[in-house]
Amino acid sequence: MTLRMLGAASLIALAAAGSLQAATPAAGDTLAPPDQQTFSYNVIDEFVTLDPALIEVVDDNDVARQLFEGLLNQDPLGNVVPAGATSYDVSEDGLTYTFHLRPESKWSNGEPVTAEDYVFAWRRVVDPATASNYAWFMGLGGVANADKIVAGEVAPDQLGVAATDPQTLVVTLERPAPFFPQMTANANLFPVPQKVVEQFGTEWTQPGNMVSNGAYTLSERVPQERITMVRNPNYWDNANTVIETINAYVIKDEQQAVTRWRDGEIDKTAVVPAGQFPTLKEELGDEAVAVPNLCTYYYHVNLREDANPALLDPKVREALNLAIDRDVIINAILAGGQKPAYTLTHWATAGWEVPEVPAAAMTQEERNARAKELMAEAGYGEGGEPLTLEILFNTSESHQQIAIAVSQMWKQTLGIDTTLANQEWQTFLDARKEGAFDIGRAAWCADYNEASTFLDIMTSDSDANDSQYLNPEYDALLETALTAEDPLPSYQQAEQMIARDVPILPVYFYSSNFLLDGTVRGWPMENAQQYWYAKDMYQVAEQ
């Protein structure tokens, strides 16, 4: 399927899908009683924000999809389906999208959801006053004037989005973006209630203040402990919603999460502790789950002018990259179906063909030998200047185990010393953003299923570019891809440029490993982005 065909295909999928997303029990399933229709799961890090304009991490996005509803959702296979919009039309030149909103959609306070709610929300995302770290997202989608607004060159009311009537939203793009419909399933493009935002300011997302339009409303939020959501009686499809309550628990200890899963306190774990998946799979069968997930695990290398001078030498960066034995990490530490990564874009991304890069073609023995040569040429390591680097990571047993392994590999192969810095989530994010690191743990999960969702994060103006990789050639390749009939060659060249310059150290491509109680139905196992909606799930009676 070419990118030019994607928009039409999405439109056909919308027409065919209708309202197939209701939580309809499969043949032979007996629903558990209503008081047992609760879905509880854990996250490892505290939630940062529930404000759609400010969301930038997966866990916050997951909660937002329960509380809010954008123009389109994803079905269990990852196709876009009707949500806040019942359909959309695309102009022949691909520059105008007209979304027809669902007339029965309401906010949780009973007021209708209108096109003006989307206009307000989208302008708010790109408004510099909002200070959203995802302000760039709309520009990536080509929405007219988005980049200029973010840069402070024009006012937010010049954004290419308009409400021609309460049920019609017209979006104008500066260039065709066939993946644009997929982007509307992301939390940053959800509508928000203007009156409530203006009344409560930064407190509008607190329980008692928040008004939302999704299948659930915010009932309780206890920092560092849990978020509780309950069914929204004003949701347009509430009659077909089965799960009554969602509990999202903050459980930082991965082993403790497994224990609480075994005790029946939670239905799903965030992860399976590193190395335990084979044993748990043998014991638990289908309740131990491994599915592809469009995320890549990597390390940022700090390339700022005031960074560790050694890291500004491409030979050092290449040596560090080559000396990471990814097979040891994915087989001996993680053991959950992950794949080694030598490039940024996930191998399972739609339409993607992984380009050839030198590191991927070598054996680990060859990589280590070349790494030693490069480090010697740079004047560091054995026989050269001593070098000490710090690996920064957020609190997690698996992140720590990987960092320890990488530090040992670098010591053994390159003769350099490494210290480890473990920080809580928000502190960690701030440190990365401010450049207070040498090597910083990172991961990127696709916002839509197309290669640019990965590659764009390394452009010079991307808020996700914590390495501060500034390469006009790379930026130009991504610009060319935006208007190319076939962007694949530009994307592949961009990947090869990353492999050459080494601003990041790719480690592995995710496989999502977790424990899921056998009574839960409706989890989207075949959705590579793992976009889930509790409204499409239900609990069956225990046998």
Image: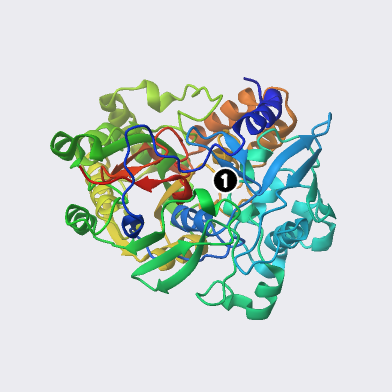
Horizontal arrangement in the rendering, residue 382 relative to residue 23 (left or right): left
CA neighbours of label 1 inside 10 A, class few (<14), some (14 to 19), many (20+) = some
Residue at image position (35%, 34%) is: 291
Residue at image position (32%, 51%) is: 270
Q: Which quadrant of the structure image shows residue 227?
A: bottom left
Whether residue 284 is visible to the viewer of this picture, yes or no, is: yes
**Which sits in the foreground, 250 or 538?**
538
| Residue 347 pos. (x, y %) | 45, 28
Q: How is the image coloured?
A: rainbow
Quadrant of image for the C terminus:
top left
| Residue 161 pos. (x, y %) | 80, 52
**Which sits in the foreground, 64 or 380?**
64
| Residue 394 pos. (x, y %) | 35, 59
Q: Which residue is mark 1?
A: 457
Quadrant of image for the N terminus:
top right
The vertical placement of 161 against 451, above or below, is below
Horizontal arrangement in the rendering, residue 351 relative to residue 15 (left or right): left
| Residue 275 pos. (x, y %) | 19, 41
Count the marks.
Answer: 1
The vertical placement of 504 against 203, above or below, is above
Residue at image position (76%, 45%) is: 100
**Which sits in the foreground, 491 or 223?**
223
The vertical placement of 166 against 109, above or below, is above
Q: Which quadrant of the structure image shows residue 98?
A: top right
- Secondary structure at numbered mark 1: helix
Whether residue 391 is visible to the viewer of this picture, yes or no, is: no
Q: Residue furthest bottom?
A: 199
Q: Check disc 1 and give the amino acid type.
A: Ile
